[in-house]
Amino acid sequence: MAEAAQYFSSSNGNCSGSSGDDNRSSELVLSQLPKASSWLKSGVTLYQNCWFPSNALPNIISFQKQFKADDQDIILASNPKSGTTWLKALLFSILNRTDCSPSNTPLLTSNPHQLVPSFEFTFYSNPKRHDLNVMSSPRLVSTHIPYSSFPDSIKHSKCHIVYICRNPLDVIVSIWHFVNNGHPDRFWKASLEKPGKVLFLKYEDLKEDTFFQAKRIAEFIGFPFSKEEECNGVIEQILELCSLSKLKELDVNKHGRMRPNFENKLFFRKGKVGDWVNHLSASMVERVDKVMKEKLSDSGLLFKMSR
Ligand code: A3P
C-alpha cells in the first residue's frame, strides 16, 4: 500500500490540472483498496472490480479523471500479451501509410510501443515529459484497462476503439500469469452494442486472415484502402512489415531497450496460436476452463480450450 501511495504522490504531483486536494483524496482511496502479491513486483490492487498493477493504478486514476477524448482519437485496447505489439505496428502503418513507405517507416528504427504510447505507462506516468496535447490528430494511443474503467469522455466521444484479445491459455503461456483482468466480455458486449465505436479482434482471427482483418481495421478507423492501393500491394507490404519475423529481426527490437532493464526483444517470442498445448497440463487447462466458463459463459465469446 505504502508503495502505491508513494508512487502516486511522486508521479501525479506533476499532473497538469490535478490539485493537491485531488491527490490527497485519491491517495486515501488507494490506501483503502484490497492489495495482493502477484508476479508483478509492485503487486496488484483491486479497483473497480479488477486487479491492476499497484504502481500503475495512480496513473490510471489520473487518466480516468483528466483525459478529454477527441472525436478523431483511435484507442488500442488489449490485455497484456494478447498481440498489442502487433496491432500497434499494424495500426501505425495503416494510419501513416501515405507519409511513410515500407523503406522509410519509423517502425524500422523504433519499437511499436514507442510509436504508439500508452495512457497509463507513458502519458499519465510522466506528464511532464509526455504531453497528449502535442500529438497530431488522429492520436493513436493504447491502454490495458478494461472498457468498464474507461474515462466517460471516451465513451461519450465519437473516437474509435480497437480491442484485441487472445485465448487465455496462450496468454498464460506468454506471460506465465493468469490474466483475466481485462474483462474481454465487456469489450465484446460494447462491440455488439456500438459496432461503429468498438472493433473487437481476436489474435487467433488476426493470425488466420491478416489481410482481411487489416482491411477491416482500416475501414473501421476511417482510413480504408483504395482499390488502387489494394492492386499495388500496399496491404501486403504493411503485413510483411508488421510480421513477427520482420519486426523481431530489426536491430531496434533485437538490441534496443524500452528502459535500462527492459529489452525490446521481450515483446517478440513465437507468436503461435495454441502453443499452450506444449506447456500446460490437463489440470491447469481444466482450472482455466472453469474460470472462463464462470466469467464468459453468458457472453457468447468462445476460445478453443481442448487439445
Ligand atoms: P507469444 O509469447 O505467444 O509468442 P503483447 O504484444 O500484447 O505483449 O503480446 C505478445 C505476444 O504477441 C507474444 O506471443 C509475441 O510473440 C506476439 N507477437 C509480437 N509481435 C507479433 C507480430 N508482429 N505478429 C504476431 N505475433 C506477435
Image (cartoon, rainbow, N blue to C red):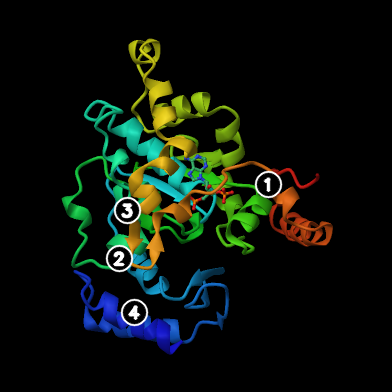
Q: Nearer the viewer, mark 2 or mark 1?
A: 1
Q: Are marks 2 and 3 in contact (CB under 8 Å)?
A: no
Sequence-wise first label, 3 or 1:
3
Q: Quadrant of residue 105?
A: top left
**Ligand 1 within 8 A of label 4's CB?**
no
Alpha-carbon distance for marks 2 and 3? 11 Å
Alpha-carbon distance for marks 4 and 3? 20 Å
In the displayed structure, would residue 5 be above or below residue 15?
below
Sequence-wise first label, 2 or 3:
3
Sequence-wise first label, 4 or 3:
4
Alpha-carbon distance for marks 1 and 4? 38 Å
Disc 3 secondary structure class = loop
Report whether 133 appears left or right of 2. Answer: left
Q: Residues within 10 Å of mark 4 (few under 14, many from 20)?
A: many
Sequence-wise first label, 1 or 4:
4
Which quarter of the rendering shows the C terminus? top right
Q: Nearer the viewer, mark 1 or mark 4?
A: 1
Q: Return the mark for residue 275.
A: 1
Q: Nearer the viewer, mark 3 or mark 1?
A: 1
Along the line of sight, the residue nearer the viewer: 52 or 193: 52
Q: Return the mark for residue 124.
A: 2
**Mark 3, residue position:** 117
**Mark 4, residue position:** 8
Q: Are marks 4 and 3 in contact (CB under 8 Å)?
A: no
Q: Which residue sits at x=75%, y=49%? A: 277
Q: Pinpoint residue 201: horizontal percent, then vertical percent.
A: 54, 39
The amino acid type of the residue labelled 1 equals Asp
Alpha-carbon distance for marks 3 and 1? 28 Å
Alpha-carbon distance for marks 2 and 1? 35 Å
Along the line of sight, the residue nearer the viewer: 297 or 101: 101
**Ligand 1 within 8 A of label 1's CB?**
yes
Q: Pinpoint residue 206: horizontal percent, then vertical percent.
A: 55, 34
